[in-house]
Image (tube, helix red, strand yellow):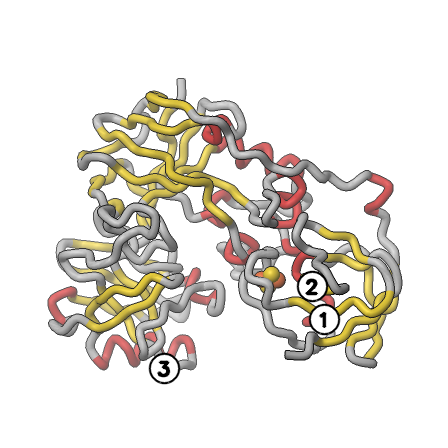
Amino acid sequence: MICVNQLFIYPIKSMQGIAVTQATVSQGGFEHDRILMISEPDGTFITARQFPQLLKIKTSVSDNQVHISLPTGESLCIDLDDFSSSQESTHVWGSNFTSHIASIKVNQFFSQYLHKDVQLRWLGRHLSRRTKRYPDVPVSFADGYPYLLLNEASFNYLQQQCPERLDIGQFRGNIIINGALPFAEDGWKTIKIGDVVFDIVKPCTRCVLTTINVNSTNYLANNEPLTTLGYFRSDDQGKIDFGMNMIARNSGTICIKDHIEVLERQNAKKYIQSFPKKTDNQQQTCIITFEGQSFNGNNQQTILEQLEQHQIPIPYSCRAGVCGRCQVILKQGEVTALTQAAIKSKNRILTCSCIPKSDIELNLLKK
Ligand code: FES
């Protein structure tokens, strides 16, 4: 039987989640889920993609208050009534809406922790943000959709393929199910959990956040698990999917052990299978030359990681072959592409999604 095995809420975007035994479903997400977020002073969202140390902050919620514990031992109690009454413009992944700003004391607390001028934002009692595809459906500070479903069997399959030890927490799901076959969720369109009906609206495209160890906040080696996911969950655009985004048709309460009923099915999205041959994977050294500066590299790590290890910073954002920011020119040599879209025309390559195959010479992309 397919059942709910774990439920999580994340009161503050990018901070630690709270495991709960039951959760209240509303259209915009679970009650208390991603109701707060760290932002730039202009309202642009900030996440653990830029500041992995956010993942170390523990949160708890009671009534109108959210409690924060930093890894340094400092703590803070935030009262939702203390946020500005004015509606301030706010931006998350290209969606523009409004939120309320915390007091100066709270903003200073987080600014000191991150060594950067930041604000804490609260959505308020009425969500002004809407999902992009469904303009009637509200959404919290989540990346795009109110709910994220993960299938433990899919995670276990990924773990079997991936050389790094993973934690399902890296995928920041809300509803984690068991009892289904790996990736059975790809073929579901509408499901019912308890009395709540959810529409599965799209697979969740993954980014660098999944490569951060949730306990140490260090990046896992070799851009894992994105590298392994790229072998079998990469589409023809180079997007790497894991988990399913959902919206709720009605409100209600769902609990651990609730049965999942599949009401409607759909054709599963097609992914490109490109597992490397075992012999491809023997460690070899090579010379990487970037803008005339050479160092010893290897055929195991992405070019982006190797450049960073040699203090050669280049722009990046997603580290997953999606945003295109890490493009360089491959002047000489060969690379292995980890996703379909990692090698582009005119000798351009995505350094986050290619590993060297031979000595390589790279140049910055001239704007
Ligand atoms: S960092 Fe986004 S494509 Fe490489």
Q: Are marks 2 and 1 in contact (CB under 8 Å)?
A: yes
- Asked whether residue 218 is in view, the answer is no
Is residue 190 left or right of 170 when viewed as pictured?
left
Helix, strand or loop status at disc 1: helix
Mark 3–mark 1 Cα distance, whole angstroms, equals 29 Å
The residue beneath circle 1 is 307
Q: Residues within 10 Å of mark 2 (few under 14, many from 20)?
A: many
Determine the quadrant in which ligand 1 lies: bottom right
Residue in the picture at 40% in, 68% down: 46
Is residue 5 left or right of 120 when viewed as pictured?
right
Is residue 35 left or right of 270 when viewed as pictured?
left
Dividing the picture into quadrants, the one containing residue 248 is top left
The residue at label 2 has a CB less than 8 Å from ligand 1 = yes
Is residue 276 left or right of 315 when viewed as pictured?
right
Q: Quadrant of the C terminus?
A: bottom right
x then y, percent, for residue 42? 32, 78
In this view, the residue farthest toward the top is: 1
Residue 117 is tagged as 3
Name the amino acid, label 1: Leu
Q: Quadrant of the N terminus?
A: top left
x then y, percent, for residue 217? 52, 61
The residue beneath circle 2 is 351
Residue in the picture at 35% in, 59% down: 13
- Asked whether residue 33 is in view, the answer is yes
